[in-house]
Amino acid sequence: MTNYGEVDRSVECTGSINAMISAFESVHDGWGVVVLVGVPNKDDAFKTHPVNLLNERTLKGTFFGNYKPRSDLLSVVEKYMNKELELLRNQQGL
């Protein structure tokens, strides 16, 4: 991605396939880890050179933060109704 150096960790949240590939290709050889959070278009393909994997970069993903609606939704609603969840009420710019 850059000619300026590599990062130890990268988290991609947009779902843009190009951003996902760039995030993976920007992590450091040997110990770099990228976590893909964003959901790409169903027709997108993640393409990178095999050397990026052979250089011991780690690629991880999460789908909805490992949230399971069928089993987790009821407990989330109960916590909300019992005021056990601290919700963000303010937003701050970057």
Image (cartoon, rainbow, N blue to C red):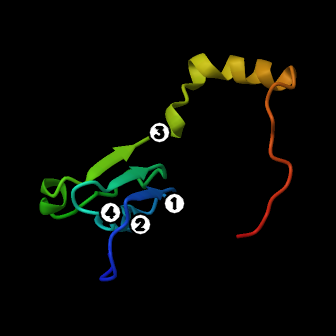
**52 lies above or below 69:** below
Q: Earlier in the sequence, mark 1 or mark 3?
A: 1
In terms of secondary structure, where does tag 3 sit? loop
Q: Quick check: marks 2 and 1 in contact, CB under 8 Å? A: yes
In space, the residues marked 1 and 3 are separated at their CA atoms by 13 Å
Q: Quadrant of the C terminus?
A: bottom right
Q: Earlier in the sequence, mark 4 or mark 1?
A: 1
Give the residue number, with chain letter if any, for mark 3.
63
**85 lies above or below 63:** above
Q: Quick check: marks 3 and 4 in contact, CB under 8 Å? A: no
**Percent of width and height locating residue 28:** 29, 63
- Residue positioned 49% across, 52% down in the render: 38
Which amino acid type is marked by label 2? Ala
Q: Residues within 10 Å of mark 4 (few under 14, many from 20)?
A: many
Foreground: disc 4 or disc 1? 4
Most foreground residue, 36 or 74:
36
**Percent of width and height locating residue 62:** 44, 40
Q: Quadrant of residue 9?
A: bottom left
Q: Quadrant of residue 18?
A: bottom left
In space, the residues marked 4 and 1 are separated at their CA atoms by 17 Å
Give the residue number, with chain letter if any, for mark 1.
14
Foreground: disc 3 or disc 4? 4
